[in-house]
């Protein structure tokens, strides 16, 4: 019982939160509610007036009265149609706006959540929440609520009219109502549970669909079309089987409710017919009574349908608010000031980090680094050493469990996140372009940039020439994730985007590792222009590209094991030297003469774990 009360309380709280989305539309809602009330009253006035028309024909034989009542009925039904139109238009308008507001609110919250949230969620599931679940909720906050109000007015209005007309016949009819209500409640509970399962399974199917479409190149290259079709088909089939259970429940309840409703009408007709024969009830009154009895039965049927919709919507609402209520791991202090324009002095002080799904496994362990303004720091190390994680801490995509990251001596957790990220540029190895035009992708770095600034950024990134050769130049659609462009072209547009942003700190994930020689040269030249005068942290996969870094930090199993210049690390003959020699050997290349001479002339040194003492700073 306590659990049931808690569930009811949670349902009411979710419903109340949904109603908040109606507040901006109270004016239209008031008009709709007034139309509902008037329309509901008119729906009762029709049957009430109809009794006099029937009695005028069959009892009084009065043609003039028949004509007057007919005109009155036409006027009633015409007015009813007008108010139904007002109700429908206003509620449809509100419904569309509420759906947009709810989706926008959900999307706004998704944009504020940290990367750790997306590491644990699949894109298809989130898309399903923003589409299928919101569409399910839409009917609840508009048409279902209005229908419930209309049916309440109709139910009690009709009940009062038939009670005044003949209380014995009314009591006879009402004996069947409790049974219908109990059946509706029982079916409604089962329906809510299965409806939630259907929505969950549909989200899973949407995830499979999104992954297959997003990875269509990989799918086709491995000729796994049939496998993906089977995977999606299985997921959709599971959705169908759950939906079939829901259909069985709804289909079973509908005929039962219908049978009981029409059975009640027949019973009322029989009981009322006896009273007409006895002279205690007129034919017009019996007709009105039957119509209003059908109205009451229809209201009960509507209530059962509304109960079904309510159960489905509450399940969808729960899933939506689960996301909206998910707090971000990156919490900004309420009084956090904006970060002023920085010089770019970057410091990591004994930083340790572990992902929250595996807190026992630290990706970084006590890493301390300092990068002075304008310096280039290269991060190297084996795969899984923690290079990308370290870079992700700088724009505060994650917060370390211990230690801190400071810029110009200020802890980045003490300033506004937006002001921090506005001064940091990121060029990842796997470049993401949006599906719009080349112009839109470059302007993403600075939305209000002038045409001259746009062109200058493109030229600096060695992108202007190839852009002008595209079919529509800067207005060319690049396709989803930039699929219409080559890897080198995508990288140069990403670099142009970063140049336009003009960040003080630049984070680079080796952007040339998967490019051909010509593209690599163009991208490398653009990167060198981009790094001029900026503090740069570069993740280096190809060690031949980091010779000119001011310092190189070597990570291994989350620890900083070596730090120094290229020549110092080669001479130290530690992990960096082994990785460097291994790359040259694996590539079948011979080191350039200066490097060979560096290695040959380096004096033998006893191996130590790191070069850290005396090199930090």
Image (spheres, rainbow, N blue to C red):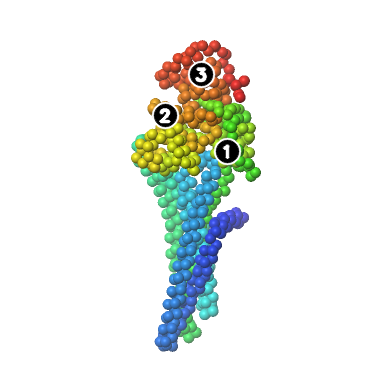
> Between marks 2 and 3, how big is the CA–CA gap?
28 Å
Query: Which quadrant of the structure image shows residue 59?
Result: bottom left
Residue with the mark numbered 2: 522
Secondary structure under tag 2 reads helix
Q: Nearer the viewer, residue 474 or 612?
A: 474
> Between marks 1 and 2, how big is the CA–CA gap?
30 Å
Secondary structure under tag 1 reads helix
Q: Nearer the viewer, mark 1 or mark 2?
A: 2
Q: Are marks 2 and 3 in contact (CB under 8 Å)?
A: no
Secondary structure under tag 3 reads helix
Residue with the mark numbered 3: 577
Q: Nearer the viewer, mark 2 or mark 3?
A: 2
Residue with the mark numbered 1: 420
Q: Nearer the viewer, mark 3 or mark 1?
A: 1
If the image is split into quadrants, where does the C terminus sit? top right
Q: Position of residue 392 (x, y in %)?
A: 54, 34
Q: How many marks?
A: 3
Q: Position of residue 507 (x, y in %)?
A: 52, 32
Can residue 19 be seen here? The reply is no
């Amino acid at each position: 019982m306590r659990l049931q009360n808690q569930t009811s309380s949670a349902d009411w709280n979710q419903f109340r939160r949904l109603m908040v989305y109606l507040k901006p539309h109270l004016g239209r809602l008031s008009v709709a509610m007034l139309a509902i009330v008037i329309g509901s009253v008119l729906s009762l006035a029709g049957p009430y007036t109809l009794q006099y028309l029937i009695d005028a024909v069959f009892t009084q034989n009065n043609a003039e009265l028949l004509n007057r009542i007919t005109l009155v009925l036409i006027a009633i039904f015409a007015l009813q149609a007008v108010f139904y139109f007002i109700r429908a238009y206003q509620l449809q308008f509100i419904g569309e706006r509420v759906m947009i507001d709810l989706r926008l609110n959900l999307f706004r919250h998704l944009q504020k959540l940290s990367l750790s949230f997306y590491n644990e969620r699949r894109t298809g599931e989130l898309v399903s929440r923003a589409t299928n679940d919101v569409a399910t909720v839409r009917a609840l906050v508009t048409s279902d609520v209005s229908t419930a109000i209309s049916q309440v007015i109709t139910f009690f209005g009709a009940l009062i009219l038939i009670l005044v007309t003949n209380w014995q016949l009314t009591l006879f009819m009402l004996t069947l109502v409790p049974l219908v209500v109990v059946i509706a409640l029982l079916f409604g509970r089962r329906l809510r549970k299965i409806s939630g399962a259907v929505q969950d399974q549909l989200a899973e199917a949407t995830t499979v669909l999104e992954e297959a479409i997003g990875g269509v190149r990989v799918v086709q290259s491995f000729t796994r079309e049939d496998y993906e079709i089977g995977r999606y088909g299985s997921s959709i089939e599971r959705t169908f089987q759950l939906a079939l259970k829901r259909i069985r429940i709804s289909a079973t309840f509908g005929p039962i409710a219908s049978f009981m409703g029409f059975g009640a009408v027949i019973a009322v007709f029989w009981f009322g017919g006896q009273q007409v024969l006895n002279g205690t009830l007129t034919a017009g009154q019996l007709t009105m009574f039957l119509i209003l009895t059908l109205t009451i039965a229809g209201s009960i049927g509507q209530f059962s349908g509304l109960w079904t919709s309510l159960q489905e919507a509450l399940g969808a609402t729960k899933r939506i608010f689960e996301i909206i209520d998910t707090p971000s791991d990156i919490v900004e202090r309420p009084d956090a000031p904006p970060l002023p324009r920085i010089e770019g002095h970057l410091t990591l002080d004994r930083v340790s980090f572990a992902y929250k799904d595996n807190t026992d496994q630290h990706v970084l362990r006590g890493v301390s680094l300092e990068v002075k303004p304008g310096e280039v720091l290269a991060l190297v190390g084996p795969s899984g050493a923690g290079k990308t994680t370290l870079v992700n801490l700088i724009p505060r995509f994650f917060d370390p469990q211990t230690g801190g990251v400071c810029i110009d001596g200020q802890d980045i957790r003490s300033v506004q996140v937006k002001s921090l990220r506005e001064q940091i540029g990121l060029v990842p190895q796997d470049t993401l372009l949006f599906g719009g035009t080349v112009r839109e992708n470059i302007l993403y770095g600075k939305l209000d940039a002038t045409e001259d600034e746009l062109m200058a950024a493109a030229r600096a990134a060695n992108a202007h020439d190839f852009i002008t050769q595209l079919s529509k130049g800067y207005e060319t659609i690049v396709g989803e994730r930039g699929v219409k462009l080559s890897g080198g072209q995508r990288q140069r547009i990403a670099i142009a985007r970063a140049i336009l942003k003009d960040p003080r700190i630049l984070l680079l994930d080796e952007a040339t590792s998967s490019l051909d020689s010509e593209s690599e040269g163009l991208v490398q030249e653009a990167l060198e222009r981009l790094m001029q005068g900026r503090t740069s942290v570069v993740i280096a996969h190809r060690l031949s590209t980091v010779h000119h870094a001011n310092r190189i930090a070597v990570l291994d199993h989350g620890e900083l094991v070596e730090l120094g210049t290229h020549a110092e690390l080669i001479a130290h003959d530690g992990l960096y030297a082994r990785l460097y020699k291994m790359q040259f050997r694996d590539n079948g290349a011979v080191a350039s003469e200066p490097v060979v001479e560096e290695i040959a002339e380096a004096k033998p040194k006893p191996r130590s774990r790191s070069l850290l003492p005396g090199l930090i700073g």
